Amino acid sequence: MNMTTDLASKLRSGTQQAHSNAEHTKFMTRFLKGDVDENILGKLLGNLYQIYSQLEAELESHQEHPIVSHLYFSELNRKTNLEKDLTFLYGDSWQEKVFPTPNAQIYISRIREVSATQPELLIAHAYTRYMGDLSGGQSLKKIAKAALDLKEDQSINFYEFSQIPDVTQFKGKYRDALNHLMIDETLMNQIVQEANLAFNLNIKMMGDLA
Ligand code: HEM
């Protein structure tokens, strides 16, 4: 059966308010003004390291899943890039210095929980993070590079997608994959609801850093 849905546009319109809330957090407002230093960036990337480690492990564990497997793109994986950034910021013993903040722990628990109980909802978590990193994340990269006074050949690896030469094209491919999932209306609504929760978990996690 060749089925298509409008999940991609449902996700976009259904999380529009949550996106606006995330964009206007104290943390993001300061970040956009270039008010970001190594300390705060280290805390953010430390949280994201824990979050992506969990998310990517769960997505990988469902590679045989009839639905979740279609939204696994290894070129999106952030864990290795985050390890490089944390080594740069904290040195070789970064593992001893990086701990998830309380709301990052709640976020991680939710990812673990949906993976165990309703893995289809991991799609909402992947969408919220990766589409964000490919979108606003690309502006945040430039801001962070300037604020940290990085050299031309240095970057925040977290925001670099070296295996995705054309981000716009890739986002189109990702939306197509969302629209081709074999899912019904009920599950679509649950995924949109879970994406809203994912935005709120991000907002709370950023609140720990401000
Ligand atoms: C200051 C912070 C942010 C800015 C400036 C920003 C900006 C943007 C822009 C311009 C787009 C549209 C890109 C396009 O249509 O191709 C976008 C999309 C998106 N952003 Fe953000 N964003 C920010 C924060 C966040 C945060 C914190 C998250 C979630 C953790 C997030 C998640 C997303 C998602 C999921 C999309 C894709 C929407 C869709 O087309 O379905 N963004 N962002």
Image (cartoon, rainbow, N blue to C red):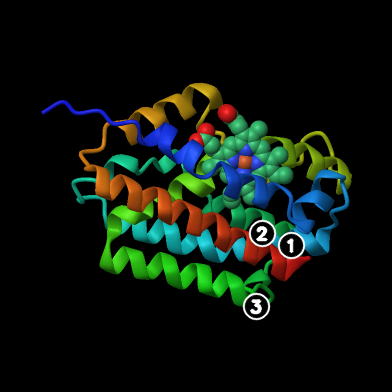
Lower sequence index among marks 2 and 3: 2
- Camera-nearest label, 2 or 3: 2
| The one of 18 and 169 positioned closer to us in this rendering | 18
Q: Which residue is mark 3?
A: 96
Mark 2 Cα within 10 Å, few/some/many (few <14, many 20+)?
A: many
Q: Quadrant of residue 96?
A: bottom right
Q: Which residue is mark 2?
A: 45
- Camera-nearest label, 1 or 3: 1
Label 3 sits on a secondary structure element that is: helix
- Which residue corresponds to the image point at 87% horizontal and 45% vertical from the top-left? 33
In the rendered image of this protein, does residue 10 appear above or below residue 209? above
Quadrant where the N terminus lies?
Answer: top left
**Is the CB of mark 3 within 8 Å of ligand 1?**
no
- Which residue corresponds to the image point at 58% horizontal and 69% vertical from the top-left? 104
Percent position of residue 108, x then y: 48, 69
- Which residue corresponds to the image point at 36% horizontal and 70% vertical from the top-left? 113
Look at label 3 and name its amino acid: Glu
Mark 1 Cα within 10 Å, few/some/many (few <14, many 20+)?
A: some
Q: CA distance from mark 1 to mark 3?
A: 13 Å
Look at label 2 and name its amino acid: Leu
Q: CA distance from mark 2 to mark 1?
A: 5 Å
